[in-house]
Image: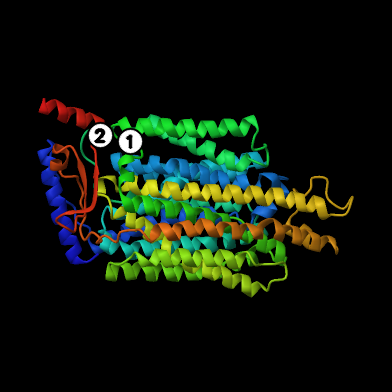
Amino acid sequence: MSSGGTTTAAASSTASAASTTRRGHAPRAPREFGKRDLALLFAGLMVAMLLASLNNTVLSTAMPTIVGELHGVEHMSWVVTSFILASTIVMPIYGNLSDLVGRRPMLIAAITIFVGGSIVGALAQDITLLIVARLIQGLGGGGLMILSQAAIADVVPARERGRYMGIMGGVFAFSSVAGPLLGGWLTEGPGWRWAFWINLPLGALALLAAIFLLRLPKKEGERPRVDYLGMTLIAVATTCLVLVVTWGGTQYEWGSPEIIGLIAGAVVAAALFVLVEWKAATPVMPLALFRDRNFNLTTLASLAIGIAMFGTLGYMPTYLQMITGAGATVSGLLMIPMMGTLLITSIITGQAVSRTGRYKLLPIIGTVVVAGALYLLSTIVVDTPIWVVCAYLGVLGIGLGLSMQILTLIVQNSFPLRIVGTATAATNYFRQVGATLGSAVVGSFFASRLKENVAAHMPVGAAPSDGAASFTPSAIAGLPEPIHTIILTAYNEALIPIFLVLVPVVAVAVVALCFVVEKPLATAIEREIPSESLATGQLQVIDPGLDKDATGASFEPPARERRAHAGSKG
């Protein structure tokens, strides 16, 4: 962090302290973050980010062995979906509570929950308990991802934040390959259960970092009022939506009472959520966020990218393992081209944004590249050379590296620091909704199509009694011809055509990003909302680096403050 940025941030903190005094709270001397403090803080955040992102992918190469051993291929999608679903539900909760009570206590809670889920997963003896373990892991993992991004915004202005966000994207890139590789190595070595046990030392390291390194500014003011009802309603609506896309057309018919009931539940919960948030004093997801144009556009793009990204990455390692006949470790290595391009592109993109302050064109190009990569992946057949598949994955990595972290930066630049955790969580929530939908839809279609293909093409009496449920890579590799080819073709025809369906989804993101307004990146940190904004009955979204409203958007203060203001007028 440059000295100029530190000085400006200190000045901003001083101004906010004065504002705090005007509101009746005791002033507190601003704390400046030097290079050493910032380095330690960032190191701690990277450990937490790695812990969460690694577990998005660590089971991907181990999945065929796990579901084969536990006899649960029909539930394979839930091992992936349960983690994403749980992390999605809690993202707005962590973001809102961290704005109210501080980042560190929430991060400590997230790490503890995540490690607890890892212990349950390591001891699981059936597929049901494994899914429960992944659900618990997700309840902690959602906080790890959100708080890592929000905490860096506490100390680094948006103009300088690009390089840090780029490195965070690099951590995700590293884990996207290190996860499958580690999962493959553990599966072929000490066993897949060590994919859970390994989280204990990593979790302990992250916990120590959170306790001793994350010395963030403390929250001051009155006791926060938590929006419990809003949190409950958003959890219900999200769960119903995911169950609809997971069960619809597979476990239940689309017109069945169960699916219709879930759709009705999602609609009712969403409607009630809007009403509750409209009146809540401290809403978990303020409706005023949606008055900002860039927030709406980048959130729509994030949702589309989430659908495509997790719909692809969740099942590609499994496909490579089955088709190539390679072991779990080798199939993890085959993901390196995507990791390498995502890592390099993400870091270069972040550096470029911090240096130039320009960012609009990068995510547009990135989403176009992602759409092209999905089309290329949809052309894969059983005998496609493996180097061609790796090249296509490399193209996908370039597109993701150009877009993902920049979208978060755009959102953070649109709101003051007091609600940056809530805003970051909101946009990531919709990205994770997309990830959940993508993973659930692709997983459901893949599992059902695979079962149908195997039943339709296998010779009478040749298929196992449980269909494809007990197929593992080693079992498939040992099958005689022509059964071996039939199974490989079934896998290809079950998964690959789905990638082409995802191309129009990403095209929506491309169009949305074309309408983003490239606002100047803030060069200072606005720690508090000026009390004058509350006095006028509106909360203006101020760019701390400018002397004017940078967004043209405004927010109404909480209902209780509006009532107090109306009473003072009367």
Q: Residue at x 25, y 31 (%)?
A: 559
* Local secondary structure at mark 2: loop
Identify residue type, mark 2: Pro
In this view of the protein, which residue sits in the foreground, 361 or 122? 361
x%, y% of residue 98? 33, 43
Query: Which residue, as the protein is rendered here, is positioned at the far right?
Result: 461
Identify residue type, mark 1: Pro
In this view of the protein, which residue sits in the foreground, 534 or 371? 371
* Local secondary structure at mark 1: loop
Crowd class of label 1 (few under 14; some 14 to 19; many from 20; radius 10 Å):
many
Inter-mark Cα distance, 2 to 1: 8 Å
In this view of the protein, which residue sits in the foreground, 236 or 210? 236
Crowd class of label 2 (few under 14; some 14 to 19; many from 20; radius 10 Å):
many
Tags 2 and 1 touching, CB below 8 Å: yes
Asked where in the image residue 96 lies, by quadrant, the reply is top left
Asked where in the image residue 388 lies, by quadrant, the reply is bottom right
Q: In the displayed structure, would residue 475 be above or below residue 20?
A: below
Mark sitting on residue 558: 2
Q: Is residue 534 visible?
A: yes
Q: Which residue is mark 1?
A: 283
x%, y% of residue 162? 32, 63
x%, y% of residue 486? 80, 60
x%, y% of residue 400? 47, 63
The N terminus - image quarter: bottom left
